[in-house]
Amino acid sequence: MLIGDIEKLAELAKIDLSDKEKEVLLKDMDGILDYVKQIESVEVPDIKLDYANKNVWREDLPASRIFSREQIISQFPDSQGGFVKVKKIM
């Protein structure tokens, strides 16, 4: 990783970094990448996965829904004259 990479990341993140901060981040990123390389080098032979991923499909059918005005109004805490009463907003 180079300083230019750190500058590009800082630009994408919309942050300003001093030269010292760039150097510190470069050192940290190099350490992280070295650690990832170390993890990648570990060999794990004969792994058997005990899970299976599968999709569960269902037929998408339209559901019949019948709503009446009275049914909708009855679900609200307050109504008057066949209208739903709500709190004043303004």
Image: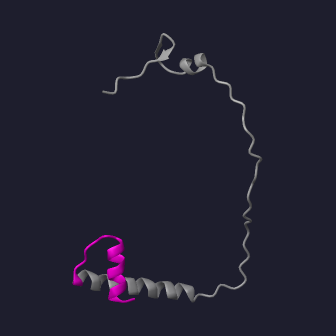
Q: Which residue is drawn at 59% across and 16% down?
A: 70
Quarter of the rendering containing residue 25: bottom left
Name the outermost residue toward the top: 81
Q: In which quarter of the image is the C terminus?
A: top left
Residue 56: percent from the left, percent from the top? 75, 54
Residue 28 vs residue 43: left or right? left
Based on the picture, tell me whether residue 75 belongs to the magenta stretch.
no
Magenta span: 1-19
Residue 83, relative to residue 40: is it above or below? Answer: above
Q: Residue at x 73, y 69 (%)?
A: 50
Q: Residue at x 51, y 88 (%)?
A: 38
Q: In which quarter of the image is the N terminus?
A: bottom left
Residue 64 vs residue 28: left or right? right
Residue 73 vs residue 90: left or right? right
Quarter of the rendering containing residue 21: bottom left
Residue 69 visible at all: yes
Residue 27 visible at all: no
Residue 32: percent from the left, percent from the top? 42, 83
Residue 8: percent from the left, percent from the top? 35, 80
Based on the picture, tell me whether residue 10 belongs to the magenta stretch.
yes
Q: Which residue is drawn at 46% across and 16% down?
A: 78
